[in-house]
Amino acid sequence: MEHAPVLLLLAPLAASILIAVLAMRRTGVAYAVATTATAAAAALSWALLLRVVEHGPVTYLVAGWGETGAHPPGLDLNIGIELVVDVMGGFVAAVVATMAAMSMVWSRHSVLEELGDRGPTFYAVACLALTGLLGMCVTGDAFNLFVFLEVASLAGYALVGSGGGRSQLAAFRYLILGATGASLYLLGVGYLYAATGTLNMGDLAGLLTDHPLTPVALAFIISGLGLKMGLFPLHAWMPDAYTCSPSAVAAFIAPVFTKVMALALMRFLFTIFGVEAFEGALPAGQIIAWMGAIAAIVGAGVAAVQSDLRRLLAWSSVGQIGYIGVGIGIGSPLAIAAALLHVMNHSLMKGALFYVAGSSRARRISELRGLSRRMPVTAVCLVIAAASLVGVPPLGGFFSKWYLLQAAIGASQPWLAAAVIGGSLLAIAYVFRILEAALLAPEKAPATATTSSGGAVSAPLPRTESPPSSLAPLVVVSGLIIVTGLLSHLIVTRWLLGAAG
Amino acid sequence: MNALLPLLLLAAPLAGALWIVAFARRPNLREAGSLLAAGVMAVVAGLIVTRVAAGDSVEVVLLDLVPGAPLHLRADGLGAFFAFMASGLWAITTVYSIGYMRGAREHAQTRYYFWFAVCLLAVAGLTLSANLVTFFVFYELLTVATYPLVVHKQSAEAIRAGRKYLAYALTAGLLLLAAIIWTHELAGEFALRPGGILPPDIPRGSLWALFGLFIGGVAVKAGVMPLHSWLPSAMVAPTPVSALLHAVAVVKAGVFGVARVVGWVFGPTLLADLGGAEVLAWFAASTIVLSSLIALLQDNLKRRLAFSTIGQLSYCVLGLALLTPEAMAGGMFHMLGHGLMKITLFFCAGAIYVTTKKTRVSQLDGIGRQMPYTMIAFGVAAVGLAGFPPLVGFTAKWFLLEGTTATGHTAFSVALVLSGVLNIAYLFPIVLRAFFRSSPDHAERADARPALLAPLLVTAALTIVIGLAPDALLPLWSLVAEAAAEVTR
Amino acid sequence: MSPVLDELMARLNYIGYVGLTLIGFYAMITRAHLMRQVVGLVIFQTGIIVFFISTAAKWGGALPIAVGEGTPAPVEHMNPLPHALMLTAIVVSVAVQGVALALLIRLKRTYGTLDEDELVQQMD
């Protein structure tokens, strides 16, 4: 348990290397290794989270650098790389690791179908991406965060590009924008270093008071991380990356990538810049909140007119990231808790929706037709995830919206509240386009069946429910949407408000 | 026991819903479960009514939903009254449903019974909600659970109607959500208390905005013009749905919401001071007259009834907006009165459809000869709706008129009387057509099947019984009178 | 030398870094040829490396290697940390270029062009 923070990173990293060395030709083995490692990471992250909630943040000095006696006397800054697991990071790490494990389990069928002999590569690279993401959650060092960010991003570009030609172009565009974002972030860190002489987040927070370079650093870091997180208007890479990549990739990336970037942004705004970000020369909070508010409306609005299912989901993500942005931008403890809660809720529901999109093999919304008969269990899960997206109580999505509205109204920002409501209204439109197609649209009778004699009862389509490896994670995630909704009160008061305060 | 009753009231439809899914392939067993759940629910609601009337507190607090607001169920006078009305009529409607769905050979009957039970679960939770968060949760559940019933036919028209319904109802839900959170910001709590929870020192501009949000949230379901247009479209649903949900449960949930907002969130004192109730009353009065005029023009029987519903719902809203104890009690009691009469009328419309496939008023010449009992029940309900004594519609109208004259609103009195006349104008021609014209189509006597006929005769009889003695079965009138008195005290 | 020129010379590195990043950014935004976008990215990242190294530079600073006994005086040395960081950053940027080039090779093989507009046209 002492080494848990670093084991959390080593598990997927080891899996990635193991697959690359031993199992490049055997998809089955690669699948087993990847699921085991991600499940182990998930278990570790939950254990860490529970411990952090109980006993306060856990710090871990990598390789013992910075322990007493390891550096010259008189130098009291941390010079080694420090891993810090606090509630905020631990929570996001737990969500990310859990969803990654679910996506790994789910991917079996889809990888065999779409990626063929490139399956092992997918698992190796996905594990590498998870290493980077978890590293971002637990690192206590601003430059180290850059390294993990690039590890995750590089793996992400490779994953997105693993489909056909379209996916490679999407991956390339994602790469150009993503690398720019990461570089901007690095530049911001450079300014912070120039201002303070340290890269340790904890030390930075103490040293960074009213320095003239702070607004510059803040601006670079917000635009860099905003790009990576897809916060409007820096979202341009997202729709193509989610639409053109293979199903397994979209299902793996969509629920987790942007969430970790949001966490990184929160770290900088709340633990490092603190008041500077909200009352300093650059009103970063207001800017992010309004970017988020516009995202909520534009994202949902554009989603409402898509006919490609995954592009719709991608634009929906743009809007949902906007909600997280609104929460971050308001910056009150309740708003931060709302943003973190939405990180979890959006991760769960977007995961479930991408699983459904993958399992049903529907590219266009109209191809969902007859889903309720062909795949009844999948259809029920679709309804749960979609209802949560709209914010039907008592599902998870409702509660993040609730706390967000409460925070907006509590901060006397009625227009932000109005934007949240407006975004939800538009979300109703696109969600019900999906549901109508999946549940209500009259089915086309299969070619072999004879048509019935004009009655209301049509010939039942054959049941082609997805295999257990695809169904189980979908059912679990849908169940989690309900459970986390019912228990959201506990999650917020016991964990998140503490993290935000 | 008193903590158990609210749970039982919710558990009955929930168990029913699960039973229905479990026995999807065995129709008799499935419908027996539905019937049993409805029966149990009605009995439990009856028990709750007697307990509340005896002054017991019937409540239970479950898990926390958000900080400061647990899932809190508590029966008060109005809640118990509504719970009993909804569950009692569900039991009757279930019998009717069986006759209707089998008679009309509807598809997807399991889905139908399942969502029907979920709707009742939502209504049960709504009636017992002791705070705004609980109220909202069930209000939204009701919206969602009604959708599959509206789109039941899955035709293009049904899907359009479903879209319209959702657009209206979910928008309203979001307004209500904002209003509830804002209320918490202003009042510091989510509770529903007789006389209101809002402190009087809030700026008037905020109060107006808040009132607007609240009424926007609940008036959609109550069908107050200009927010009514989803209701006639929703008539595409199977008739039992129109009968129970679009005449009793869903739309009355809107009226119930108005009552809660007026009496339990703002409180009559604050609202009278603000002038918000006056505006609401004007909307309601205009709705009463306009909808009756539109009803005159409808040839489709169910649409005519739908516009009639819109008008009658505004009777309730008007009563609540007048803020005197008598008028408020009248408005609340009319929830039951209108429920009984309108459900009878819809039952008749459905019975006519199943027996003869006729849906238009102009096709009903001489149908009284073919279906005499059905049309007699129709006549009774029509008379009641126009407000003739001693039927149940009279009670409400009497107290409403008392309220309008007491508050000196002559215009509202005129609207009420005018609407009575219009009621006669749009319902009586149907009765006259049925009995005093003849048509070769309807020469032979062949009334509706017993499963359809029995429920509508029972509800028609109830309009007479409860009209004569409102407290005969259970102390229903006393409950709402007490609730109104408590609010205005 | 004139004071203006002095000022300029003292900040030459920083002017250089701003210039490089702007050139790189401009190339990434305006060029339709994907290879040129990669080149833009490389220039952009090089600019940032120049910036970091500049923060470490010191007139007359010695190599940061501890010689002999006693605690070294930090004031007399170049700051070694930015150099170490930039070694990592260079590795990262090489990796990014590697992935970018790999994607471009695949695109070129499939479509025979790297012009963004032509690619989009061929895909539709």
Image: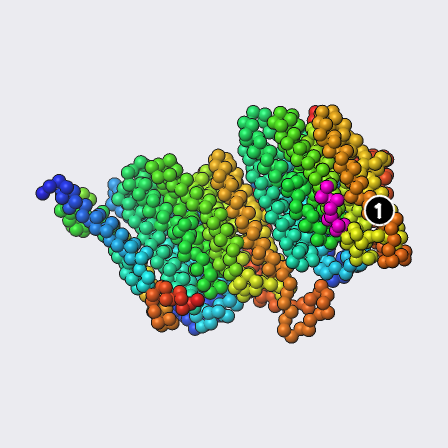
Q: Is residue B189 above or below residue A436?
A: above
Main SS of residues in magenta? helix
In magenta segment, residue A355: no
| Location of the C terminus of chain A (image quadrant) | top left
Residue shown at 21%/51% (left/top)?
Answer: C16
- Magenta range is B293-303
Q: In the visual, does A305 lie left or right of C53?
A: right
For residue B226, above or below residue A245: above
Residue A481: x percent and y percent?
56, 52
Q: Quadrant of residue B195?
A: top right
Horizontal side, residue C35 vs residue A487: left or right: left
Residue that badge 1 annotates: B431
Q: Quadrant of residue B174?
A: top right
Amino acid type at circle 1 is Val
In the image, is residue B295 part of the stretch drawn in magenta? yes
> Is any atom of residue A328 visible in this view?
no
Name the residue at the bottom extreme. Answer: A448
Q: Most extreme residue toward the left, as rendered?
A: C1
Q: Secondary structure at mark 1?
A: helix
